[in-house]
Image (cartoon, grey):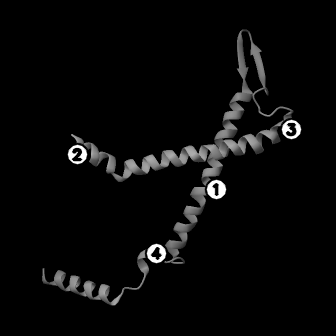
Amino acid sequence: MLKGFKEFIMRGNVVDLAVAVVIGAAFGKIVTALVDNLINPLIAAIFGKPDLSGVGNFKIGKGEFHIGLILNELLSFLFVAAAIYFCIVFPLNKLAERRKRGQEPAPDDEPLTTDQQLLVEIRDSLRQRS
């Protein structure tokens, strides 16, 4: 039972997921700081309040509608998505394009040493005999 648990924990996807959660939490703090210290002051300069929670509120009968709260969450989502795209996705896509075009050598493209060349020849020779 413990062996199975150890194998589960040591799988690459579990470790990758754990790293992603930790990085995501740290990245969330960056986005929060960006919103609190840059976006909210801009909103306060335009609307007179540091957030949009008071914008577009109205009542119909006993129902209260808070359009500003929806706008706050929408803007937060857009800022997170933009930050992820421009800081992570876009640079990684550009790097992948460069590698595909051969502009940046892959780590495995280094020339082989004499010993490595000899081992490759031995391997190829053994394959031909099989």
Q: Which residue is mark 4?
A: 106
Sooner in the amino-acid sequence: mark 1 or mark 3: 3
Label placed on residue 46: 3
Q: Is residue 126 left or right of residue 18?
A: left
Q: CA distance from mark 2 to mark 3?
A: 60 Å
Residue 121 vertical placement versus 92 (above, below): below
Q: Name the quadrant containing residue 52.
A: top right
Q: Name the quadrant containing residue 127.
A: bottom left
Q: CA distance from mark 4 to mark 2?
A: 36 Å
Sooner in the amino-acid sequence: mark 2 or mark 3: 2
Q: CA distance from mark 3 to mark 4?
A: 49 Å
Residue 128 vertical placement versus 98 (above, below): below
Residue 47, percent from left and from top: 85, 34
Q: Nearer the viewer, residue 41 or 80?
A: 41
Q: CA distance from mark 1 to mark 2?
A: 42 Å
10 Å crowding of disc 4: few (<14), some (14-19), many (20+): few
Residue 43 vertical placement versus 59 (above, below): below
Q: Is residue 51 left or right of residue 129?
A: right
10 Å crowding of disc 3: few (<14), some (14-19), many (20+): few
**Callout 2, which amino acid?**
Lys
Contact (Cβ within 8 Å) of mark 4 with mark 2: no
